[in-house]
Amino acid sequence: MRYLVLSDIHSNIDAFNSVLSFFKKKKYNKILFLGDLVGYAAAPNQVVEKFCSLKGTSYVRGNHDKVCAGLEQGNHFNDKAKAAALWTMQKLTRKNLNFLRRMPQGPLVVNQDILIAHGSPINEDFYVFSDFDAYQIFMHTKNFITFIGHTHLPMVYEFDGEDIRGFWLTDRMVLKLNRKHRYIINPGSVGQPRDRNPKSSAIIYDSDLDKIYAYRIKYNIQSAFNRIKKRQLPIHLAIRLEYGV
């Protein structure tokens, strides 16, 4: 089975379309989505509708999905994120708003090997930035792979039962997984990368070969920039796309 693993699209339809087009040639059987369809950028309806048109998806909600759907107030958001969330909530169609409200809370068991969550299977809003953060997840789970998003950083944490090794996923990297180890894997962000690389980030997991294939995909950043500017969202949300921060 080949899984396309995506996270954090954040209303960036230009990035989302480019990623889907790129992976048509790579062949996959199922999509695993780790949350945050919306928030930040200016095409929330287009992103939700495109996602709903896809077949073979397993997914969980993200923190921006919750706030944009009105399930939470976003009190922990900074001013720019909250402004975008409020704008998104006003622009979403009733159908798309209801879809966001029905998105399941993680963690979600995909099969005996795979668990997916937004921030962490312990707490969907928790950020995993360190070996210590990863250790807490390993102590609370038993599955082979936990896929997470939320940080927008393409990272792997590998646990051999004693030590944890954390490292970046880079473009065209092929990682052979060890069945005697366990993994937490973040594919990075489709719509708002934050590792100083503006290209979209996504991975393929081949469960037959136990291999991860990491990719960076170029998209029309100027188009995404212009959408944000035209809708009068905070300009910082457009500028950061150019720098991958």
Image (cartoon, rainbow, N blue to C red):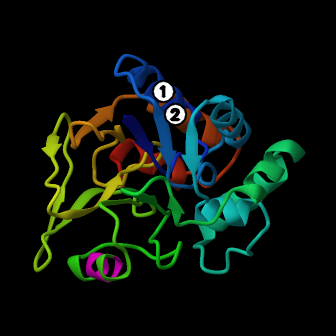
Q: Quadrant of residue 23?
A: top left
Numbered tag placed on residue 16 in the rendering: 2
> Is residue 23 shown left or right of residue 213?
right
Dot 1: what SS?
Answer: helix
For the C terminus, the quadrant is bottom left
Towards the viewer: 80 or 140: 140
Q: Which residue is mark 1?
A: 20
For the N terminus, the quadrant is top left
Residue sticking out furthest to the right: 94
The picture places residue 230, in percent across and down from the top left corner, at 68, 37
Tell me the magenta residue range.
Answer: 133-137
Mark in the foreground, 1 or 2: 1
Is residue 138 located in the magenta-colored stretch of the structure? no
Q: Quadrant of residue 202?
A: top left
Residue sticking out furthest to the front: 112
Look at the image and tell me whether residue 87 can be seen.
no
| Placement of 192 over or under 82, stated as above or below | above
> Is residue 208 shown left or right of residue 202?
left
Tally of marks = 2
Amino acid type, label 1: Leu
